[in-house]
Structures are given as structure tokens and as C-alpha cells.
């Protein structure tokens, strides 16, 4: 199994004493015993690694693919999206995107952060002080940073330049926007409507269900979250409240 994000294998090894002697084919029993040692925000890598290993062992023991134990095959091919590192230079970013398209990818995701593109542009953001953290993962709505209409249009025009490279047939998703207020996120999403994005990801921390729903209900761009969530229940809460359009579990984080 994978202890994700290159974290220490010690996380998985320290749980060893709690499962010695158990049948690895009893995956749910083992997971329920270990789940208390996991947490959200990518703090469950050791638990998920052991669960993944148990699925692998069970598949080998019964000589069947793991998907057969999870309800059977639904499709024979999967479309993968290709992520692309950010660049303030649209020509550089366009070349990176073109390389991925030439590799055969037909679905793309891009990082388009306020920090990278707007911090040195007069009139693009307000409330920012030099040295202030603006990265994803902070409490976005508590920073006092707001994006202006000018700033929103600059980011939208940047995405449109990417559209010139990959065309309109290929879906493009966007991530890593940085910290800003709720109304600024809505303003940015409205500016992105002309770009026909597949989704905007992790616009605010996933815990804020009501705020996510307010964003989702206010814009036409699909809203996505999920990569930092542990266990099934938070996803159920998001779905039952229609707080987002798309959930995206990372199985080495969620279990």
C-alpha cells in the first residue's frame, strides 16, 4: 500500500502491532480497527496504505481482480486528466499544455493562482500585504484578501489563452486559486463562465458545507472538492446538501 505524499513509512509500521494475527481478507474488520488513527487533510496515509495492501492480499488469495470484490467492472476504459504546473507566462504554460496534448491526453487541469498571476498587478487584488500567505489550504475566507473585477478578468483571459492551445473539445479543470473572500470566489467563477471549465476545485476548505453550497448555487461553473477528505461520511454530507457538483475522493487519503 501507499503511504501517500512521500510520508514516512513509520506511520504504517506503527499500526503493525494492532493487526498481527488478523486475516487480511477481513478488510472491513481491519479498517474499523485502524480508522481511529487516521484524519482529514492527508493525515490517514498509514491507515489507507494498510487497507490498500489488504485489498491486494485478498485479491491474490481469491485470485480475482479487486474490482470484482467491489461490485464488478463498470467500464473497460477510463479517461484520465493531466495536471499542469503553473506559470505566470501564458506562452510557457501554453507550451506545457501543448506537450501534454501531443502525448495524447484529452482532459486537462491547470493551476491558476492569485499568488502567481496577480500579486504584482496594480488594481487586481485588495487587502494583500507583502509576506501574507495566499496558498491553498489556509482558511481562505479569513485572510481579508479580495479579488477585483479586473483581477478576475485577467485570470479568465489567461484560461482563454489556454483554450487556444487545447481547443474547445477538451475539458479543462482549474485548481489552486489561493486565499480570498467568498464573494471574490463567486466573482472569479462568474468571470470563468466564458471559459467552459469542467470544474473549479477546492475553492474553499471542504469543511464549510454551507459556504460551498452558497458558491455552487451562485455560479454556473461546476464546483469540486474531496482530495483532503477522510472516510465516507463527509462525502455523504456534501452530497446530501448538494454543496458541490463533483466529489473527487483520493483513495490514499479517504480510504
Image: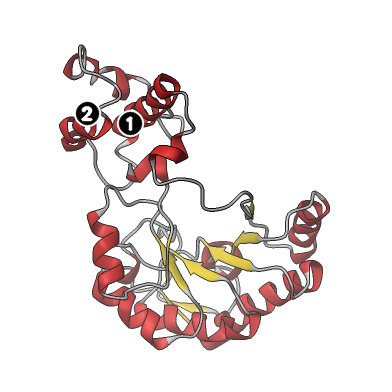
Nearest the viewer among 162 and 233 is 233
Q: How is the image coloured?
A: secondary structure
Q: Is residue 138 left or right of residue 26?
A: right
**Looking at the image, which residue is at 35% across and 78% down?**
182
| Figure check: 220 above or below 88 | below
Nearest the viewer among 122 and 114 is 114
Dot label at residue 51: 1
Nearest the viewer among 98 and 183 is 98
| Figure check: 123 above or below 116 | below
Res 207 seen here: no
* Residues tagged 2 and 1 counted as in contact (Cβ below 8 A): yes
Q: Quadrant of residue 246?
A: bottom left
Residue 194 at what x, y percent from top left?
63, 85
Residue 137 at what x, y percent from top left?
37, 56
Q: Quadrant of residue 243?
A: bottom left
**Looking at the image, which residue is at 56% across and 66% down?**
174
Category of crowding for the residue at label 1, using alpha-carbon neighbours closer than 10 angstroms: few (below 14), some (14–19), many (at least 20): many
Dot label at residue 30: 2
Res 47 seen here: yes
Marks 2/1: CA–CA distance: 8 Å
**Looking at the image, which residue is at 58% across and 66% down?**
173
Please tell me which of labels 2 and 1 falls first in the chain.
Answer: 2
Which quadrant, please, contains the C terminus?
Answer: top left
Residue 147 at what x, y percent from top left?
47, 79
Nearest the viewer among 121 and 84 is 84
Category of crowding for the residue at label 2, using alpha-carbon neighbours closer than 10 angstroms: few (below 14), some (14–19), many (at least 20): some
Dot label at residue 125: none
**Looking at the image, which residue is at 55% across and 68% down?**
119
Residue 229 at what x, y percent from top left?
32, 52
Q: Secondary structure at mark 2?
A: helix
Amino acid at each position: 500500500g501507499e503511504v501517500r505524499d512521500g510520508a514516512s513509512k513509520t506511520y504504517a509500521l506503527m499500526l503493525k502491532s494492532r493487526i498481527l494475527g488478523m486475516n487480511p481478507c477481513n478488510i472491513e474488520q481491519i479498517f474499523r480497527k485502524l480508522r481511529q488513527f487516521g484524519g482529514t487533510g492527508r493525515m490517514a496515509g498509514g491507515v489507507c496504505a494498510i487497507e490498500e495492501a489488504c485489498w491486494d492480499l485478498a485479491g491474490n488469495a481469491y485470485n480475482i481482480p479487486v474490482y470484482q470484490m467491489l461490485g464488478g467492472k463498470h467500464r473497460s476504459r477510463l479517461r484520465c486528466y493531466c495536471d499542469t504546473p503553473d506559470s505566470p507566462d501564458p506562452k510557457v504554460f501554453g507550451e506545457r499544455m501543448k506537450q501534454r496534448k501531443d502525448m495524447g491526453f484529452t482532459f486537462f487541469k491547470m493551476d491558476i493562482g492569485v499568488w502567481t498571476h496577480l500579486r504584482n498587478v496594480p488594481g487586481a487584488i485588495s487587502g494583500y500585504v507583502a509576506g501574507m500567505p495566499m496558498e491553498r489550504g489556509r482558511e481562505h475566507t479569513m485572510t481579508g484578501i479580495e479579488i477585483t473585477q479586473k483581477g478576475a478578468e485577467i485570470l479568465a483571459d489567461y484560461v482563454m489563452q489556454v483554450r487556444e492551445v487545447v481547443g474547445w473539445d477538451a475539458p479543462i479543470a482549474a485548481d489552486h486559486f489561493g486565499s480570498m473572500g467568498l464573494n471574490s470566489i463567486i466573482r472569479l467563477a462568474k468571470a470563468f463562465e466564458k471559459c467552459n471549465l469542467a470544474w473549479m476545485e477546492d475553492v474553499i476548505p471542504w469543511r464549510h458545507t454551507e459556504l460551498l453550497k452558497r458558491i455552487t448555487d451562485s455560479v454556473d461553473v461546476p464546483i469540486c472538492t474531496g482530495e483532503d477528505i477522510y472516510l465516507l461520511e463527509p462525502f455523504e454530507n456534501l452530497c446530501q446538501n448538494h454543496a458541490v457538483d463533483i466529489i473527487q475522493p483520493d483513495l490514499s487519503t479517504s480510504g
